[in-house]
Amino acid sequence: MTDRRNSNRRSQAWFGAQGRSGMLYRSWMRNQGFGHEVFDGRPVIGIATSASDLAPCNAHLTRVAEAVKRGVWQAGGLPLQFPTMATGETLMRPTAMLYRNLMAMEVEELIRANPLDGVVLLSGCDKTTPAMLMGAASVDLPAVMVTGGPMLNGKYRGQDVGSGTHVWKFEEDLKTGRMTEEECFFAEGCMARSNGHCMTMGTASTMACVAEALGMQLPGSAAWPAVDSRRMETAQAAGRRIVDMVEEELRPSRILTREAFENAIRVNAAIGGSTNAVIHLTALAGRVGVKLDLDDFDRLVREIPTLVNLMPSGKYLMEDFCYAGGLPAVTAELLGGGLLHGGPVTVTGRTVADNTARAERVGSDVITPLDAPFQPAGTGIAVLRGNLCPDGAVIKQSAASPHLLTHRGPARVFDSPEAYHAVADDPDLDVDENTVIVIRNAGPKGYPGMPEVSNVPLPAKLLKAGVTDMVRVCDGRMSGTGYGTVVLHVTPEAAVGGPLALVRDGDPVVLDVPGRTLRLDVDDAELARRREEWAPAAEQYVSGYTWLYTQHVEQADRGADFGFLRGGRGHAVPRDSH
């Protein structure tokens, strides 16, 4: 084994200190049973874990941490596990997104404040992965991501069912009488039958793949199911690798380059990934000083076909994706077509091209070939502009209905998601299949936190009439497990005076996805008159974290990060107070 003792390591400012300070640091650590020899200058590796019973997607990460520890010990490092908050979208109210920035702050400060030379990041649910990446990027110590893996495929009455995606399907079946309450209750347990995050290509699976595409996660590790033994093998390998990364001084700033972000954007299109990746990648780029514009998410994907046939856009699930070759197979396919950069370095110390040189695509139905894709080029995320969204909006074309991508219809406006839900089942609700449902005040500041509420269920009377989709427009987000013709992230949001605040019932809304426009067919003079009448709502929060959030959160086109967190703050050792 290589002698990894080094008195110049960052951790030695604590454990190698002379006199009273060093004695205090070492003696308190020894109450856990560590012998004096572990303070000899070997790399100290933090294992940041978001394990929590309140975040079901992350609940098993304590076991994953044990596998990481084995790898760190194998490679001659000292593993020290520490907890972080867990932002689980499944339980947190009003939305986990409200707390992504708080978690990123916590991760950043915990890494910087402690005697660490490198860190392994253990995440699961939607917001934990970007939050950890954002925090680690701002410190810029060697870091590797280990996501907790998807659940096993859901199974209900002989068919595969996807977590999240089938919640909406079952709700529609319940409203139309195709399913009973008892059947729904039974189906709950069929959707989520093992540890892990959503096994659809929702935001959790998307961000795991995006972390791998960025080069921050070991190749192939995004897709192994949470309960597969190879998930633990991957974690152990990450523990070994982070020790080498400390030796090599391989930091996030060397990995998270402009080319790496371009790869991640294109991979997200190829896998049919979540629109939430737009917000998280934009925020992460802001932490490392990479210029990333909203229009990049449109321009870079126009020639990228959707290769992965997974719910909510397709029919398969993450377990199938794993066995079909996982992300390396997708990456290799795109590289073969000249659609990715092969040169960016990754946490392996090798390039993207090196990592995928031996990748194999198994079969042709789950991961389709580039010359016969699941959906053609141009079906990824589209960025819209117009007088309703001057700073942009997005739509996931692969999850939308083709006949609605060009649409004109009268607006039916609701000032909150709750206002819509209160009347959605009213048989006399004044809507038809041409109506454009507008939900506002669901943005970063307005809700607050920008919840996943944009894909509201269709009115019950239309579902019963056989209508399966409608155009919906909102300044909030949509779950990556959701589907439908939904315009999201309308910016500026209504709460800060964006044009969405000026829409009135009956106003013609014109959606033209091929032309990349979303506009309100109302003349400028009338909109100017309405703006003069508009006034912001009174501030709801005057103290606490939510006040801090509403005062400092940026708009969706800038990643909904806090302005004061943009850029990095480095890993200089804090002053010693002992």
Image: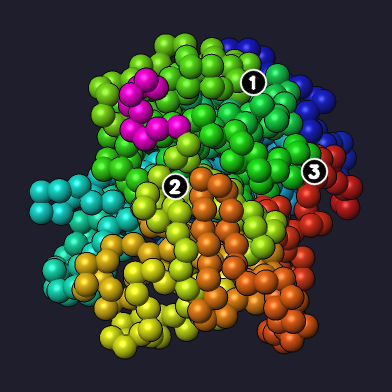
Number of residues whose C-alpha sits closer than 10 Å to that of mark 3, classed few (under 14), some (14–19) or many (20 or more): some
Image coords of residue 153 (percent x, y): 25, 45
Please state which of the two labelled residues, at mark 2 or mark 3, is closer to the viewer.
2
Image coords of residue 347 (percent x, y): 60, 25
Q: Which residues are magenta?
A: 368-377
Q: Is residue 374 magenta?
A: yes
Q: Secondary structure at mark 2?
A: helix
The residue that appears at 70% across and 20% down in the rendered structure is 247
Does 61 appear above or below 68?
below
- Can residue 154 be seen by looking at this rendering? yes
Number of residues whose C-alpha sits closer than 10 Å to that of mark 1, classed few (under 14), some (14–19) or many (20 or more): many
Q: Is residue 544 left or right of residue 213?
A: right
Q: Secondary structure at mark 1?
A: loop
- Residue 401 or residue 7, whichever sits in front: 401
- Sequence-first tag of 2 and 3: 2
Number of residues whose C-alpha sits closer than 10 Å to that of mark 2, classed few (under 14), some (14–19) or many (20 or more): many
The residue at which mark 2 appears reads as 397
The residue at which mark 3 appears reads as 568
Question: Which quadrant holds residue 496?
Answer: bottom right
Q: What's the mark number on residue 344?
A: 1
Image coords of residue 325 (percent x, y): 35, 24
The residue that appears at 47% across and 78% down in the rendered structure is 412
Amino acid on which the number 2 mark rests in the picture: Gln
The residue that appears at 56% across and 22% down in the rendered structure is 340
Question: Which quadrant holds residue 386?
Answer: bottom right
Amino acid on which the number 3 mark rests in the picture: Gly
The residue that appears at 72% across and 26% down in the rendered structure is 254
Placement of the N terminus among the 4 image quadrants: top right
Q: Is residue 508 left or right of residue 285?
A: left
